Amino acid sequence: MLRLSKKAEYALMAVKDLASRPESEAASAREIAERYGIPVELMAKVLQRLVRQDLLASHHGTRGGYHLARSPERISVADVIEAIDGPVMVTACTSLDDECEQFATCNIRDPLWRIKDQIVQALTSYSLQALAADESPLVPISLSPRSSEPDALPPVAHVPQT
């Protein structure tokens, strides 16, 4: 199952909170952690990792705290997830993986890599500005590769009621 780590979820919650604030307003790790019921120490570690990845900036002092290092439209959800969890992966193999016994005969690796690329593109196209505004992504994702209409959903089978 594809799933974000709890740390990545906490990071997204924190950056959405920061993106929703005025640019000049900073927030402490304690303030964000208490607002969302997250352990303060864990939130502090997550925020420090985001600072190391140049997504957040921190300032000490009475008016200190964390704020976005760039404008929210220039930071994607993918940036935040990858800062915490590393590259998005769908399969255990990454590229030419000599350790996998099925690498040469695998019939799902390439299609799954293409799916991973679509997931990364969707996460990359969704900015913190859109996340903070709770908007839909700008790039529609087709759920049906056989459809000629990009937004069409696959047909739903009719189940007679008894």
Image (spheres, grey):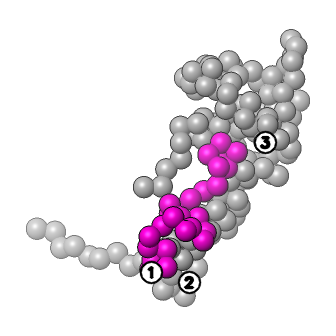
Decide if residue 109 is on the left or right side of residue 155: right
The N terminus sits in image quarter? bottom left
Residue 78 horizontal side relative to residue 21, left or right: left
Q: Which residue is mark 3?
A: 53
How far apart are the two marked residues, 3 and 1, measured between alpha carbons?
A: 38 Å
Q: Which residues are magenta?
A: 80-108
Q: Nearer the viewer, mark 3 or mark 1?
A: 1
Q: Residue at x 29, y 76 (%)?
A: 157
- Of residues 67 and 159, which is closer to you in this image? 67
Q: At numbered mark 1, what does the secondary structure look like: helix, strand or loop?
A: loop
In the rendered image, residue 128, in percent from the top left (x then y), is placed at: 73, 47
Mark 3 is surrounded, within 10 Å at the Cα level, by few (under 14), some (14 to 19) or many (20 or more) other residues, namely: some
In the rendered image, which quarter is residue 30 located in? Answer: top right
Disc 2 crowd, CA 10 A, few/some/many (<14, 14-19, 20+): few
Distance of mark 3 from mark 2, alpha carbons?
Answer: 39 Å
Which callout, 3 or 2, points to the residue nearer the camera?
Answer: 3
Kind of residue indicated by mark 3: Gln
- Residue 150 locus on image (x, y percent): 58, 79
Q: Which residue in the structure is indicated by mark 2?
A: 149
Look at the image and say whether residue 96 sits in the magenta stretch. yes
